[in-house]
Amino acid sequence: MKLYCLSGDAAKPCFVLSFKELLIMLDCGLSAHSLLSFLPLPPVPSTRLAALPAYSPPHVSDPLLDGELKECCGRVFVDSVPEFCPPLDKVVDFSQLDVILISNYTCMLALPFVTEDTGFKGRVYATEPTLQIGRFYLQELAEWLAPGAGGARAARRWKELLHVLPPPLAHARPRAWRRLFSRAALERSLARVRVVGYDERVDVFGALHATPVSSGYCLGSANWVLRSAHEKVAYVSGSSTLTTHPRPINQAALRGADLLLLCALTQTPAHNPDHMLGDLCVHAGVTLRAGGAVLCPVYPSGVLYDLLECLSAHLEGAGLAHVPLYVLSPAADASLAYSNILAEWVSAGKQARVYLPEEPFPHAALARGGRLRHARALADDALADFRQPCVVFAGHPSLRCGAAVHLLELWGASAAHAVIFTEPDFPHQEALAPFQPLAIKAFHCPIDTSLNFAQAGKLVRELRPRELALPEQYAGARPALAADVPTLLLRRGAARAPAVRRRAARAELCGELAARAAPRELRAGLRAAPLSAALRVRDARLTLEPAAGAGAALHWSALDVPALVAALAREGVGEARVEAGADGCIVHLPRHDTLVHVERHATHVFCEGRADVRQALRRALAACLPHI
């Protein structure tokens, strides 16, 4: 067994497990930290961004670099279509992957990079909410960053001059960055996904079973349990023990694993999600009461559902029920509508509302009452009567694309407004860097419900795995996570071999051999039968079938020592001396430097001689034993 780590971002993991001659990819997260090196791609042309001064490295005159870099308040940005950092494609051949298991929709955005134009012929498994909400995320990105979007060009020359560029560009690794895939590649990739339900056993080419179990993190999020006849591997990614809208985590299915692979822990361990949600409501209320607008750069799903529920209730209690809430996203309509038909994937409390009957989430009622409005783009008719003060949820959280870019340009010069960051994926100061100087108030209220280090350590102690594997980013928290468990640290681009070793395999006995077998009682409660069979391996299934030819004979029974001495003489290996011992006897052949130690249930041959002597010994032993 081997583990390959293909991602340097522990929150957007991608691993490949080599297990029972199979290559199994666990998640294919797309790291978007590279977006922060680029200028925003506004949906409406921005004169401010266009007027930013060009940057040229000192003592470098390169006409190919003209226009690729711009400077804003002392920080240098790439003026180009933003690029992402997909999983490494040189460590494992993607065409050899047998199966991809997706844990949640935040960890599947690199799927087209893995499955398209790589020769991939395997299978992809995910729960229905993971597939559908992941589709919303990907379609949103594809619409914002389609080739030619915003008129931006693809800058390349700057990647050759990193050594003369200022940080953080000087420390980047842009050669692995790639532009977003086409819409056609996206659709082809999603068409490969096979939908599975919680606790459904998926047969993986007969070698093992993969079972998704609830992880408690988001709608449809799953941890995966891989089981063979004698081994168990648990993959825990993006899990939560908090009480939120998804189904709670299923810990029982993860217990007793030979190997526990743990990743996607919280990115903000110092921030309590409940406290951050309370702070957000307070900051929003204060801003709205003063007549300002609130911008929340968010993804089109996930925490958005909780934000709408909690913020609407807080505003109503604060006498601000008249303040409209807007959701701007190409996937807003589909995401909000789809979330209310996922009764089997939500918590018991929200399931109970379905049977009343009511929607599990309140945003449908907010939309019917006119408090919540959603639109695909800024120019949609749904925003014809756009009014302030208001709260706008818009993407992208990096502030490098989407409607949030234009709204920040619009409101950034006024201290009456506020921008509140809730997504933990990006440092908010770096997200705001290309918009400086800003007068708008900025608040950082990251809401990350995934396991923190203390919760993860408690989970590991309860699950009691034989071995633990962690991304190297968690090395500092290793004592808290696994004080008494052998631990592997996984580094991007490296392969590690867990201590799990295959010591046995399960095979099926064909009917013909089963009928032929005549078990004998060896001792009380133990019966056995000698068996001569051919081992057939097909689709990772082992089958014992009747053996063909005399070469497959099985020799058995106790060894007759006088008959062995006579057989050795016939083979020309004479001068045998027999010495009695406490547990049998020893046949010594001094001329050939050979010992045959005969015990009651075993015979051991120690021979350093020539190949012809070893063959003669084999024939003599076979002549003294009955066979089937």
Image: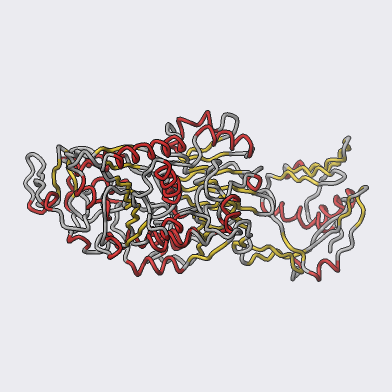
In the rendered view, tell whether residue 538 sits above or below residue 67: below
Q: Where is residue 82 drawn, in percent x and y? A: 25, 53
Asked whether 465 or 247 is in front, the reply is: 247
Q: Please give the name of the residue rendered at 60% of the width and 64% of the height, measured from the top-left corner.
A: 205
In the rendered view, tell whether residue 194 sits above or below residue 587: below
Q: Where is residue 436 drawn, in percent x and y? A: 18, 40
Q: Please give the name of the residue rendered at 65% of the width and 49% of the height, measured from the top-left corner.
A: 231
Q: Where is residue 293 drawn, in percent x and y? A: 27, 45
Horizontal arrangement in the rendering, residue 273 relative to residue 203 (left or right): left
Asked whether 425 or 557 is in front, the reply is: 425
Asked whether 545 or 489 is in front, the reply is: 489
Q: How is the image coloured?
A: secondary structure
Asked whether 374 or 167 is in front, the reply is: 374
In the rendered view, tell whether residue 395 sits above or below residue 594: below
| Residue closest to the far front | 319
In the rendered view, tell whether residue 152 sits above or below residue 609: below
Image quadrant holding the C terminus, namely: bottom right
Q: Please give the name of the residue rendered at 74% of the width and 68% of the height, measured from the top-left corner.
A: 545
Horizontal arrangement in the rendering, residue 133 relative to residue 606 (left or right): left
Horizontal arrangement in the rendering, residue 55 relative to residue 484 (left or right): left
Quadrant for residue 202, please give it. bottom right
Quadrant for residue 594, please give it. top right
Number of labels in the image equals 0
Horizontal arrangement in the rendering, residue 37 relative to residue 502 (left or right): left
Quadrant for residue 43, please give it. bottom left
Residue 159 shows in the view? no
Residue 478 shows in the view? yes
Q: Where is residue 534 drawn, in percent x and y? A: 72, 65
